[in-house]
Image (cartoon, grey):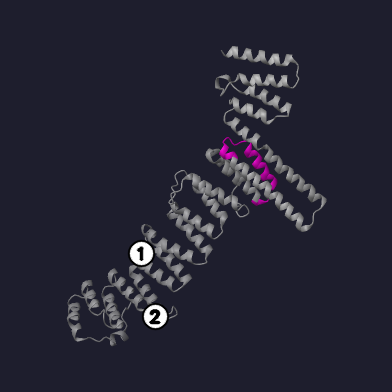
Amino acid sequence: MPILGHEHQRDLIFEEDDLAYEEEILRHPFSVKCWLRYAEHKSNGPSVGLHLIYERALKELPGSYKLWYNYLKLRRKAIKGRCITDPGYEDVNNAFERALVFMHKMPRIWLDYCQFLMDQCKVTRTRRTFDRALRALPISQHHRIWPLYLKFVRSMPLHETAVRAYRRYLKLCPENAEEYIEYLVDILRLDEGAVRLADIVNQETFVSKEGKSNHQLWHDLCDLICKHPTKVTSLKVDPIIRGGIKRFSDERGKLWCSLADYYIRSGHFEKARDIYEEAIFTVITVRDFTQVFDAYAQFEESMLKAKMETSAESGSTEEDDIDIELRLERFEDLMDRRPLLLNSVLLRQNPHNVHEWHKRAKLFEGKPKEVINTYTEAVQTVTPQLATGKLHTLWVEFAKFYEKHGQVMEDSCVLYLNSLALFGTVR
C-alpha cells in the first residue's frame, strides 16, 4: 500500500539545516528515534512538510505505534476548529483507516478514531467502527472500548441501539447492571428495568457498585413497580411485595403502603382499601401501624374530596349524595376505630399484657356485649406465668362489671370462685 504519493515526492523541498537529519535517516532508515528527531526539528515549520516527514517514516516503518500515534494526533490538531463538512476531516479518517491496517490491535488508536467520528456526528459510521474495534481487539481489551461506546449511544436519541449495546456489555460486565437499569428508567422502558432490577435483587452474590444493600435494591424495585403499575407488566407485583413483607419485618408498614399505592394507581380502589384493612390487622409495631393508618386515612379523605368535587362540578344527584354519605361515614368510622386498632397492635405484640386488656375493655364502654367478650378473651389468652401486670385484676374487674350492670350475684360469685381456683392452682 503506497503511503507517499508521487505528487508529494515532487513537492519535497530540503532546507540547508535539514541535511544533517536526512543523512542520519539515510544511514538509519529503520530507526524510529531518527524520524522523531527529524519531525521535532520540523515541528515549527509548515504542517505540510511535517506531514510529509511522517508519511516517509511510515512508509519505512508501517508497524510503528509511536509514529502512527503522533502522526494521527498531528493531523487531528491541524483541522481542529474547522466545520465538520470540511474535506480535511475525511482525509484524516482515511489516515486512521490506513493506520488500522497495522494498528488494529491497539485500543488507543481505535478510541481516538471513534472519538474523532463522534465529533463529526457520523452516527452509523461511529457505531460500526466501535463494533469493528470490539471484533478486532482481544476480549481482555474490551473494557477500554465500552465506556466510550456507552457514552456514544447514550448521547444519541438511539434508544433501541443503546439497549442492544448495553445487553452486549452486560455479558462482559454483569456487575454494572445498575447503570443499565438507570438508563432504562431514564428512557421510560420501565418494564425491562423492573425485570433487570428483580434479577439482581434475587442474586445473593450481587454487589452493588453504588453501595446499596439488597434491602435498598428491594425498596427501589417496590417504588418502581408501584409508581408505574400500567408500564410494568412482566412482573407479578402483589407476590413480590408480600414476599418483601415477610422478608423485611422492620419495613412492613412501608411495604403495605406501597402495595396499596400500586392498586390505587391502577384504579382498583376497593382492592386498595382491602389491603389497608389487612395491613392494620396484621402489623405488630406502632410505627408500622401509624404509617399504614395515616396512609389509609389520607386515601379515604382524598376519595371523599374527589367525589365531592366531581359532584359539585357536574351537578349533584341523589345517588351522588348517598355515595358521599357512605364515604363520609366510612371515613368517620375509620377515625373512631383508631384507638381500638392501636390497642389491637399492642396486644399482638404482647397478648399477656394485663394493662392493655383493661384499656381495651374501657374502649368498649357502653357496649356490654363487647366488654364481656373482651374479658372472656383476656382470661382465656393471658398465661399466668407470662402475664405483665396483675392477672387477678382481670377477674376482679370482670366480676365487678357483672355487679355494676345488675347481673345476678351468682354469676359474680362464680367468677370470684373461678379466679380463686385458678390462682390457687398457680401457687
Residue 88, label in figure: 2
Amino acid identity at mark 2: Gly
Amino acid identity at mark 1: Pro
| Labels 1 and 2 touching (C-beta < 8 A) | no
Q: Is residue 332 left or right of residue 346?
A: right
**Res. 234 in view:** no
- Which one is nearer the viewer's eye here, 279 or 95? 279
Residue drawn where x is 19% and y is 84% of the image:
17
Q: Magenta stretch mostly in which secondary structure?
A: helix
Mark 1 is surrounded, within 10 Å at the Cα level, by few (under 14), some (14 to 19) or many (20 or more) other residues, namely many
Quadrant (top left, top right, bottom left, bottom right) of the N terminus: bottom left
Question: Residue 207, relative to residue 132: is it above or below?
Answer: above
Rounded to the nearest whole Å, what is the CA distance between mark 1 and mark 2? 24 Å
Q: Is residue 32 left or right of residue 383?
A: left
Secondary structure of residue under mark 1: helix
Q: Is residue 364 left or right of residue 135?
A: right
Q: Quadrant of residue 95?
A: bottom left
- Which one is nearer the viewer's eye here, 45 or 422? 422
Q: Quadrant of residue 344?
A: top right
* Residue 193 picture location, percent across and down: 54, 54
Q: What segment carries the magenta color?
A: 265-289
* Residue 384 picture location, percent across and down: 58, 19
